[in-house]
Amino acid sequence: MGFMKRFRRQKTPKDKELRAHAHADLYAPAAYAGPDLTRRLDDKILRRIFELVCPHAADHSLESSEESGNDGCMSCDMRDLAHCALAKRQWYGPAAGLLYTSVRIDAVHYCELEEVYAEQRRRKSRAGEDVDAPTLRLQQLARTLRDNQHVGSRVRFLKLPYMTRESCKADLARAVSVCPNLEYVDLPDGFYNGDPSCHTLRQELQARCPHIRKMKYNEGSEQTLESLLHGYWQELRILEINKIQMEPTIFRRVLGMLSWLSEVSFSGCSWLNDSVFHSVPGMPDFPALDTLKLHKVNHITAEGLAQYMSMPVCSGTLRTLNIKDCAGLPVQSLHIILQAAASLTTLEYIANVSASLPIDPLPPMTSWSLEKLNYEIISHSANQMYPPGASYYQYLTTSLMSGSLPALRKLYVRDPEFPESLTLAPPVRPFADSPAHTPRGFNQPLEVFSKGLDELEWIFTSILPADSYGRRGSMSGGRPLSSYSASKGLGPQWGGDSRKSIVVPNGFGGFLAVPAETNERPRSAGHLSPERPFGHGHSQSVGSANRQSWMNHGAGRDKRSSRADLWR
């Protein structure tokens, strides 16, 4: 029998195997036999290369998992970075440092591999129960950190999906207990309102993680907020207070313990008034902040804010001020706030109005440092011929035309016709009779983002004013008159139904709309490159950069710019 086996016909390989071997031979990379040039790279260059391999590993923002992230599949990027750490001994230090500095666990793969892994988990499931991949990853991470304290000391940011942090509180407590340098972690909602189920997690975080930089206190966590007087989390930088009921004296003592504090947000605090900013003997002053946010805080007035910003300790420190639906801070008081805030660069003002501004003249909004202004006036008056919000935007137009905001470069408004109101302003004389007279008019480049109440995307318009001294050869120094509507597009001859236009004076009192360079559909604003910023005549759709979906077959993990706006 053994002799007859020699005459048996050998098994022919399948066509699929033949194609696989042929493909491997055809596309096999050429072997490099020269010197290893990567040995010359120092750790800084290697770290920068690995940051490009896994971009989210360099995410040091104090934002939740839902608000932070990058394009592509972050789980695959983390896998590639782990492979780089094991590829070479020289690469292990820089790669491992990034691998555990900012740890992120995602619920799914944002690529085509999610279908493959989902099928594998479905086969391994028992009794028809699906395997919860994020929970397993968190348990494995906790076991790794507890087995290696050196790795645990590297973790500074830990970001988890919402359902994972809500259902795995015990595993999260075990993970943070061995991370002494942790600065930010995604926590369950019960942690912020004093839920007893988060008591163990709170104890571990207070005892083991003294370097926490951001914390939020919602209604019901008054005792937890007061516990900061015992010395917990002295390095807090961002503090969010939502519907907390507390004595102002105790609250001032709590703020006095946080010497690193730079941003405070108040929401729905009915007890908060101007007295919280007053200087009281024997009590620490209200801290000097970089950012102050007020939402539905009705008892703080412009005079109180002006007094706070005029204090020697706080003068010149406030850079960002957000005011939303505060009855004590109407539009009529914005000029008081801007005059007191000498270093304010960003102002966000959102208000719902039901009546027009009074006919009494108001001083213009004046600021020499303001660079970005969100001026969103919302009035629900569809049946009125003259909506109340028109007077508020007229006040903004008057302030801009008076030259009171010379540093302003970005403006957000909730009026789709506002860019045209700037171009339709009354003309002014290019030269004054008196040499000391300052010409009146809009004399600065401005990026205007506008949208209506029923719109989801901002419409971008770049306005380049005419030279008031006639340096463009203009015979008149008036404002350029726009006959096109930025909200309705510039027509097919300018690149289709464009959502971005550039208004450029033509030197004769009119304007010139710059057409698109190609006849392509406008690309998404999430794929704009630094080499092609706004203002070069190319139509773009202004919106947030969406994460590449794993359901988009054929796209892979490459970050390709979209040739069409799919959301039209």
Image (cartoon, rainbow, N blue to C red):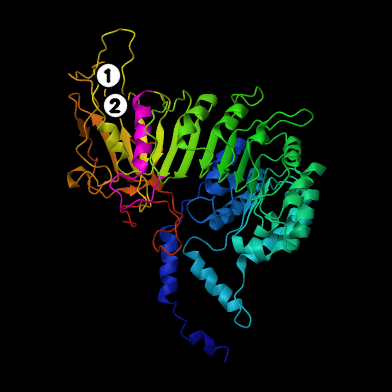
Quadrant in the rendering for residue 168:
bottom right
Q: Circle 1 — which element?
A: loop
Q: Which mark is residue 332?
A: none
The region drawn magenta spans 378-403
Quadrant in the rendering for residue 253:
top right
Name the foreground residue: 164 vs 130: 164
Q: Is residue 345 above or below residue 10?
A: above
Q: Left or right: where does residue 456 sit relative to residue 472?
A: right
Question: Is residue 42 in view from this perspective?
Answer: no
| Residue that appears at 33% across and 23% down | 443
Q: Is residue 233 above or below residue 474?
A: below
The amino acid type of the residue labelled 1 equals Ser
Judged from this view, the residue extending furthest toward the top is 435
Residue under numbered circle 1: 468
Q: Position of residue 108 (x, y in %)?
A: 54, 63
The amino acid type of the residue labelled 2 equals Pro
**CB-based contact (under 8 Å), mark 2 and mark 1:** yes
The number of numbered discs placed on residues in the rendered structure image is 2
Q: Residues within 10 Å of mark 2 (few under 14, many from 20)?
A: many
Q: Position of residue 291 (x, y in %)?
A: 58, 36
Q: Position of residue 167 (x, y in %)?
A: 67, 66
| Residue that appears at 55% across and 32% down | 302
Question: Is residue 44 in view from this perspective?
Answer: yes
Q: Left or right: where does residue 342 sit relative to residue 546?
A: right
Q: Left or right: where does residue 22 sit relative to residue 93?
A: left
Residue under numbered circle 2: 465
Quadrant in the rendering for residue 17:
bottom left
Q: Circle 2 — which element?
A: loop
Q: Is residue 386 above or below residue 162?
A: above
Q: Residues within 10 Å of mark 1 (few under 14, many from 20)?
A: many
